[in-house]
Image: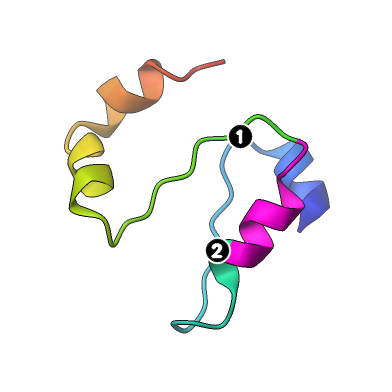
Amino acid sequence: MSKRLEQFPAVALLGPRQVGKTTLAHQLAEHLPRIYLDLESHVDRAKLMDPTLYLSEHED
């Protein structure tokens, strides 16, 4: 997975609840610039109401 993080601008980590996906993602990407969105958070989901606008603000 770490190779994918360096190759692609976005990577999804999928799996069942409470198996350590968030912990793994933070550990693998700790040396990379990143934006973390928790799709269980109402605030983070609201950011994606207009994904084109949100992502255009984070092109770098």
Of residues 32 and 14, the one drawn nearer to the viewer in this rendering = 32
- In the rendered structure, which amino acid carries the disc numbered 1? Pro
Q: Based on the displayed image, in which of its 4 quarters is residue 56 positioned?
A: top left
Q: Is residue 30 magenta?
A: yes
- In the rendered structure, which amino acid carries the disc numbered 2? Thr
From what the image shows, is residue 50 above or below residue 19? above
Residue at (57, 69) in percent of width and height: 21
Residue 22, which numbered label?
A: 2
Measured as percent of width and height from the top left, residue 26 is found at 64, 53
Of residues 43 and 14, the one drawn nearer to the viewer in this rendering = 43
Residue at (59, 50) in percent of width and height: 11
Q: Based on the displayed image, in which of its 4 quarters is residue 44 positioned?
A: top left
> Which quarter shows the N terminus?
bottom right
Other-residue count near label 1 (Cα within 10 Å), few / some / many at <14 / 14–19 / ≥20 = few
Residue at (25, 39) in percent of width and height: 48
Side (left or right) of 50 relative to 33: left
From what the image shows, is residue 27 above or below residue 8? below
User: What is the spatial separation of the Cα atoms under label 1 and label 2, in whole angstroms?
Assistant: 18 Å
Which callout, 1 or 2, points to the residue nearer the camera?
2
Other-residue count near label 2 (Cα within 10 Å), few / some / many at <14 / 14–19 / ≥20 = some
Side (left or right) of 36 relative to 19: left
Measured as percent of width and height from the top left, residue 4 is found at 74, 49
The magenta stretch spans which residues? 23-31
| Marked residue nearer the N-terminal end (1 or 2) | 1
Secondary structure of the residue carrying numbered label 2: helix
Q: How is the image coloured?
A: rainbow
Of residues 26 and 39, the one drawn nearer to the viewer in this rendering = 26
Measured as percent of width and height from the top left, residue 53 is found at 27, 21
Residue denoted by label 1: 9
Secondary structure of the residue carrying numbered label 1: loop
Side (left or right) of 50 relative to 44: left
From what the image shows, is residue 53 above or below residue 15? above
